[in-house]
Amino acid sequence: MRIQSIDILRGIAILGILFMNIYFHGSLITGYGELSPKPVMDTFIEIVNTIFFDGRFRTLFCLLFGAGLAIQYNACKKKQLSPKVFLSSRLNWLIVFGIIHGVFIFGGDVLLLYSLSALTILSALELPLKDLYKKATRYITIGIILSIAFTLLVIIFAEDSPMMRSSEDYIAMHELWFSHYGYQVLIQGGITFGLLLLSPLFIYWQVAGLMLLGAFLYRVGFFNKGFSAKRLKIVLTMALIFITIDISCMALFDISGEISSVLSSVSAIFVALIYAHIVIKLTKKKSHFITLYAAPGKVAFSLYILQSICMALLLRPWQESFYLTAHRIDYVMIALIFTLVQIGLAHLYLRYFNQGPLEYIWRKAYQRSINKNEKNLGT
């Protein structure tokens, strides 16, 4: 039986990710080049992103990934199947999709990192609740320390100022990126695998820890009831503390978007938990508005790849007319319009089909691998 709040949260997460990724869908290496003088609206959108968007939906998606692992683990146990064989097969095929997506479509892919991280924590799904929670908090704490340390090192030793759109470096990178699709593939592949290799130094610990926390939250029934009032106050307090640090660093040190994203990944943990709590409560009240996101959540994999394909086709041909003149509000409006399109598509598609197209292909692929493995073991 599907848990409606998880479907809704997954839908919100996958749609929300676009609002941060969109700055890089067109040009992965330059992202959003800052304008001089900086428009007031750009500053406002940066503050809104820092508080409500930056890292929040990736974190929420990561928590749900872990909850999904726990759900599948329990289902395997009930059916007397091997959870390790089943989950490993699913994740191995997701790695294949992640490599294709990251190298050929969008180098900001998370599927590869998430799948490999999940493979390293499968054995932890068997832990008792207390041990599972301890391991989750230990991993997350290591991730927080490394993220803060990395940000401090950049602030102290590096001259990390935002790249101006009028600078020679930006123009050179811009022209090189749009010179040839083969170059884009080379850069996307380098970033995809480079992030993977560097992940043990910072991002892996948060990703793995959040997945473990998601599994823990599922097992204690969080996705059916949310936080207690006491627990919610603690999470709110931590969110406010780290958001204040984010905004202060952004104002005092003028750090760039990439570095601020590393720092904001800490506050994102607590903000994502607050989002989850709010959605769970609204789901219990049967809010019609919130249930609109259940359909996108059921086809989240397909929508995630669709975002990358459509944004690449839409944004990459506009190398002169758009990138050199666009403001942040232009990107926000594109993301907002495409979000409405995705919600409509998801509802329309699910009238006729039970699964998203990529969900169907993925399921067929890993089931075939499982059947082949069982046949070999039987032989």
Image: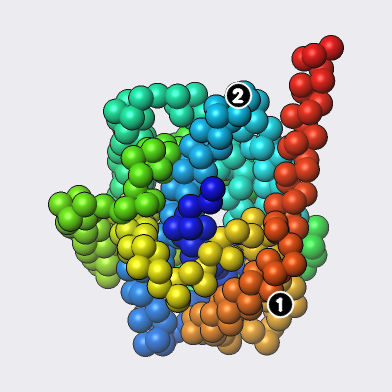
Q: For residue 325, which quarter of the picture?
A: bottom right
SS at badge 2:
loop
Relative to 202, is 353 on the left or the right? right
Distance (Cα) linking label 1 and label 2: 47 Å
Relative to 62, is 343 on the left or the right? right
> In x, y percent, where is residue 288?
45, 75
Q: Which residue is mark 2?
A: 80
> In x, y percent, where is residue 234?
18, 52
Q: Which residue is mark 1?
A: 314
* Location of residue 94 with respect to 302 vertically, above or below: above
Nearest to the observer: residue 370 or residue 213: 370
Q: Is residue 187 visible?
A: no
Q: Is residue 51 visible?
A: yes
Local packing at callout 1 (Cα closer than 10 Å; few below 14, some 14-19, many 20+) is few
SS at badge 1:
helix
User: At x 58% / y 50%, what residue is drawn?
Assistant: 110
Residue type (three-letter) at the residue carrying disc 2? Gln
User: At x 67% / y 47%, what residue is drawn?
Assistant: 98
* Location of residue 331 with respect to 147 vertically, above or below: below
User: At x 49% / y 24%, what residue is drawn?
Assistant: 123
Q: For residue 180, which quarter of the picture?
A: bottom right
Which quadrant is home to the C terminus? top right
Nearest to the observer: residue 197 or residue 60: 60
* Location of residue 131 with respect to 367 vertically, above or below: above
Nearer the camera: disc 1 or disc 2: 2
* Location of residue 162 with respect to 204 vertically, above or below: below
Residue type (three-letter) at the residue carrying disc 1? Leu
> In x, y percent, where is residue 137?
31, 36
User: At x 64% / y 37%, what residue is drawn?
Assistant: 91
